[in-house]
Amino acid sequence: MLDRKEIIHRNLEKLRIIKIALEELLRISQSTIKSLSWYNKRITGNKQDFSFAERLYGSISEDDIEHIPESVFPIFINPLQKLVSLGNDYQDIKDHLQSIHDKMGALSGPIASSTSLVSNATGYTAANIVSLGSQVSFTSIDVNQLVKEYLSQKEVNDEIEYIKLQLPKIVPDISADYLHFLENYYGSEPSAAKFQELIGCRSMIYFKLIYPIAEIYGASRPASTRRQQIAKFVYGRTTAIDTSAEKTIDMTKELWDDLSDQDPSGQSVKTGNVTPEYIEIMFNKVITTLFTLLRQRELLFVP
């Protein structure tokens, strides 16, 4: 019979193998997204090439075509024929890519099911370990701190989903911007270059969501401060002050300051002087702040 240490050791070894597979899966997924983005750029360029040829040759009248000298016509038609010949390859490429896309689509169900089951199991693990605190004393690890960090990240995931549901109710057009922001952030490897996504997110939150609505309710620049505009976004026509909402308004103003800071002596999203670790911290702060702001608005806003 296996002893306790061996049982844990064997399961941890299997866990490490699974984790390595997940890391590789993430790398492949991100690499694929990166490659496809460059393909999209090239394909878009080719589409423009074909569109130009179509407009050019399609706009020449039949009368003009008939008057092209016999000796010149082969030279005239050669580029069009060459484009058509080269373009035939795209049909095979399209079919092949569609096949890959369909196979990837077939994986979405199992992936969603697996991630949900794993998430539930991990949540159970966290709750189970904490509940044993009164019966078992762990001196080698701070279990509560580890669980707290895990649950904090899980909260960010839940907040992302809440924001996704709330934005269409306020400014429907901004939902696509939010999804684009998430796709770009999760679609690439950790990098300081992601500061550009946060700059775009800053414009989305403040210039496309908060400030336009604040102006509808009379809070415009320069007469109103940024904080007053954020407050108007939360309250609308409400005149009563809510203590919890005021803290949220301060937090949202602080996020604006963080994303707008250009101090060369420290890390700055605005100037791109950041580390990947700082980017992750700021991403989590963006999500938590926007979540808290929208939740307060849902409770207090009067149109």
Image (cartoon, rainbow, N blue to C red):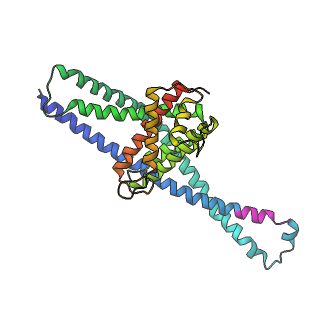
Number of numbered callouts drawn? 0
- Is residue 64 rendered magenta in the image? no
Q: Is residue 220 above or below residue 236?
A: below
- Is residue 60 rendered magenta in the image? yes
| Residue at x 50%, y 32% (from the top left corner) | 294
Q: Quadrant of the N terminus?
A: top left
Give the prevailing secondary structure in the magenta stretch: helix
Q: Nearer the viewer, residue 138 or 12?
A: 138
Q: Nearer the viewer, residue 138 or 49?
A: 138
Which residue, as the protein is rendered here, is positioned at the far right? 63
Residue 124 in the image: state x and y as whole percent: 30, 24
Image position of 150 (left or right of 292):
left
| Residue at x 14%, y 34% (from the top left corner) | 140
| Residue at x 24%, y 37% (from the top left corner) | 14
Which residue, as the protein is rendered here, is positioned at the far bottom? 71
Residue 51 in the image: state x and y as whole percent: 70, 60
Query: What segment is highlighted magenta in the picture?
Result: 52-61
Q: Nearer the viewer, residue 2 or 133?
A: 133
Residue 109 seen anywhere in this rendered image of the structure: no
Image position of 84 (left or right of 170):
right
